[in-house]
Image: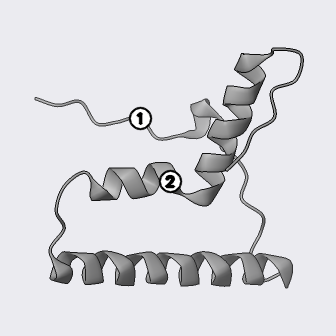
Amino acid sequence: MQVVVRDNNVDQALRALKKKLQREGVFREMKLRNYYEKPSEKKARQKAEAVRRARKLARKRAQREGGLPSPTARPAAARPAAAPRS
């Protein structure tokens, strides 16, 4: 992977490199490989990720077709307050 450094601007080159690595999934891969993951755990994680992707895709498809309203951020005042702990 290459990043061009223009006008000795190393900070900009580092940002570009970080963005490329993020897009390729290198940081996520490093995090996953930090510890050993049993094959059964790996399979369960991959299945959960696939389900999550499928739900997200279905949600986006429904929004495009007009089945669901677009997600909007609720104002902080409209959110229910957390119950006090005793």
Tell me if residue 79 comes above or below residue 40 in the rendering: above
Q: Amino acid at mark 2?
A: Val
Measured Cα–Cα span from mark 1 to mark 2: 39 Å
Q: Residue furthest left?
A: 86
- In the picture of the structure, the residue carrying the numbered disc 2 is 26
The structure residue drawn at horizontal position 75% and vertical position 39%, both measured from the top left corner, is: 3
Q: What percent of the width, then of the height, locates residue 79?
A: 53, 40
User: Which quadrant of the view contains residue 76?
Assistant: top right
Q: What percent of the width, then of the height, locates residue 46?
A: 37, 79
Do residues under tags 1 and 2 come within 8 Å of each other at their CB atoms? no
Q: Nearer the viewer, mark 1 or mark 2?
A: 2
The structure residue drawn at horizontal position 17% and vertical position 83%, both measured from the top left corner, is: 40
Q: Is residue 17 left or right of residue 53?
A: right
Q: Is residue 58 left or right of residue 34?
A: right
Q: Is residue 59 left or right of residue 45?
A: right
User: Which quadrant of the view contains residue 13?
Assistant: top right
Q: Residue furthest right?
A: 7
Residue nearer the viewer, 78 or 31: 31
Tell me if residue 41 comes above or below residue 15 in the rendering: below
Q: What percent of the width, then of the height, locates residue 41?
A: 20, 76
Q: Which mark is residue 61?
A: none
- In the picture of the structure, the residue carrying the numbered disc 1 is 81
Residue nearer the viewer, 31 or 66: 31
Q: Residue furthest top?
A: 8
User: Counting other residues with Cα less than 10 Å from the Cα at mark 2, is it few (<14), some (14-19), or many (20 or more)?
Assistant: few
Label 2 secondary element? helix
The structure residue drawn at horizontal position 63% and vertical position 38%, both measured from the top left corner, is: 18
Please identify the quadrant where the C terminus is shown: top left
Q: Amino acid at mark 1?
A: Ala
Of the image marks 1 and 2, the number of the one nearer the N terminus: 2
